[in-house]
Image (cartoon, grey):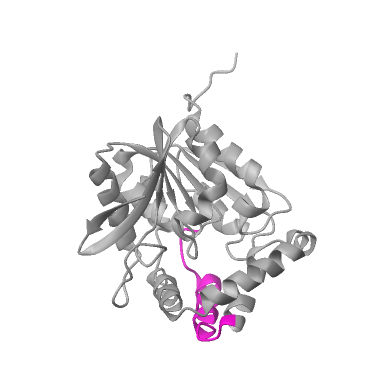
Amino acid sequence: MARFVFQDKSIHYEEYGAGEPIVVLNGIMMSCGSWAEFVEPFSANNRLILLDMLDQGKSSKMDGPFSQAIQAEVVLALLDELGIEKVSMLGISYGGEVAQRFAIKYGHRLNRLVLFNTTSRTGPWLGDIGEAWNLAADNAEAYYMTTIPVIYSPGFYREHYTWMEQRHKVLQTVFSNQEFMQAMVRLTNSSSDFDVTDQLDQIQTPTLVVSCMEDYLTPMEEQRRIVERIPNCEYVVIPGCGHASMYEKPVLFAALTLGFINNPKTTFTIV
């Protein structure tokens, strides 16, 4: 566990393992701790770098509204702090949005890019979902019911309902923390005007985009929009999986990420 200072804010990050570096960018509610089960596989052959962005986890809270664009600058500052010239990057959901911003502006610092369950814009659908989250933010139970069930596929939710009930109890406490909830509102609002769709063709980094068939927060059409615009892009669809792919399909999540990042070849000649 370590920290550095970015614009008078304390930024928390964690490092594990050695080898080609992978920076992981959290989904909106996540923190470094959310990746505990992935530390072992992700650091077995790589230098794994986990990051709490502004208003996440153990990093400093913001004093008021901010633009998501600053999160890409946090990532750049992290690489400079560590003296790393190039990394591969994994971003899921909100973290995938930040990863796209980074790839557009600082693509020369990337080796590979992996995007799970994300979008290139906050359209009316996602914008209204975010507004619903904000409206429920002053009531822990309402916030849980508004945000959590929809991020899982119906089958996973049904088959793992005991686990979901345990999560419910844990998150009730988390969502009762006003500092956390104020940060969630700011994070949600930070991406309200997000739209990099017309800039995606600037991403030259070899990219893997992953959709899940039962993702109701960022539906497959959102990832297809990305795939159509990034020149050097591979696309995978996971059936029977919702938005929280890392929890629903952890083995596949790890295999896709590590297989793509650690494959030394980006082109093959079939003879």
The image shows residue 233, relative to residue 142, as above or below, that is above
Please indicate whether residue 45 sits to the left or right of residue 254 in the image: left
Place of residue 99 in the rendered image (x, y in percent of width and height, measured from the top left): 40, 51
Query: Of residues 191 and 249, which is closer to you in this image?
Result: 249
Count of marks, rendered view: 0
With respect to residue 54, does 102 lie above or below?
A: above
Residue 189 placement (x, y as % from top left): 41, 74
x and y percent of residue 186 in the render? 39, 75
Image coordinates of residue 131 in percent, x first then y, are: 50, 80
Q: Residue furthest top?
A: 271
Q: Judge by depth and name the residue closer to the eye, 239 or 253.
A: 253
The C terminus, quarter of image: top right
Residue at 36%, 54% in the rendered image? 101
Above or below — where is 53 with respect to 150? Answer: above
Identify the residue shown where x is 61% and y is 59%.
243
Among the 4 quarters of the image, the one containing residue 60: bottom left
Q: Is residue 113 magenta?
A: no
Which region of the structure is painted magenta?
A: 119-140
* Residue appearing at x 56%, y 81% in the figure: 140
Vertical side of 267 occupied by 194: above or below: below
Q: Residue at x 38, y 62 (%)?
A: 58
Q: Nearer the viewer, residue 140 or 22?
A: 140
Q: Quadrant of residue 69?
A: bottom left
Q: Nearer the viewer, residue 114 or 145?
A: 145
The reply, left or right, for residue 108 in relation to residue 26 is left
Say if the magenta span includes residue 133.
Answer: yes
